[in-house]
Amino acid sequence: MSHDVTPSPCTRCGACCASFRVSFYWADAASHGLAEDCYEALTPVMACMKGTYSKAPRCTALSGQIGQQVACTVYEHRPGPCRELQAGDDKCRLARQRHGLPPLLPASSKLVPHEPRQSHP
Ligand code: SF4
Ligand code: SF4
């Protein structure tokens, strides 16, 4: 059996963690075991990752330097929107553009639909 050990482009990016408000139904946090100090209330039923409800969003759970080396420090517990975003999709392209990064090549975006962050160090 062969194993693809190609590094994910996401470990050298992180742009989508610093481009959008990451909001979700409040119960999503508990269902994924996300610690309460990682998110804040938006409405009585909606919450968002701390740091993302800002004109210059950056999730406080992201460590590292955008476009260099990054890691999601709560990867196993990240909320739904972080699981849904796929490397190479429209939000990815927009986020990378905002941070002056080129779009992913088709070959690299096929690597791992969002598994990338799993290997964020
Ligand atoms: S999904 Fe796209 S924008 Fe997000 S970290 Fe990966 S390559 Fe960067
Ligand atoms: S929880 Fe992790 S994957 Fe989601 S925005 Fe924050 S750093 Fe990015």
Image (cartoon, rainbow, N blue to C red):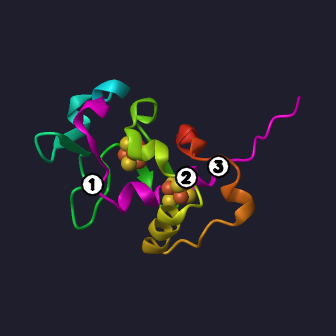
The residue where tag 3 is placed is 8
- Pointer 2: what residue? 86
Task: Answer whether residue 3 is magenta in the image.
Answer: yes
The quarter of the rendered structure image containing the N terminus is top right
The numbered dot on residue 95 is: none
Question: Looking at numbered disc 2 in the image, what kind of residue is underneath it?
Answer: Gln
Q: Is residue 73 in the magenta section?
A: no
Amino acid at pointer 1: Thr
> Is disc 3 in contact with disc 2, using a CB cutoff of under 8 Å?
no
The residue under label 1 is: 52
- Mark 1 and ligand 2: say if the CB distance to the nearest ligand atom is below 8 Å: yes
Where is residue 78 drawn, in percent x and y?
40, 37
Q: How crowded is mark 3: few (under 14 residues within 10 Å), some or many (20 or more)?
A: many
Indicate yes or no: mark 3 CB to ligand 1 under 8 Å.
yes
Kindly indicate whether the residue at mark 2 contacts the one at mark 1 (C-beta within 8 angstroms).
no
Q: Give the range drawn in magenta.
A: 1-29
Label 1 and label 2: CA atoms lie apart by: 18 Å
**Horizontal arrangement in the rendering, residue 90 relative to residue 55 (left or right):** right
Residue 11 position (above or below residue 119): below
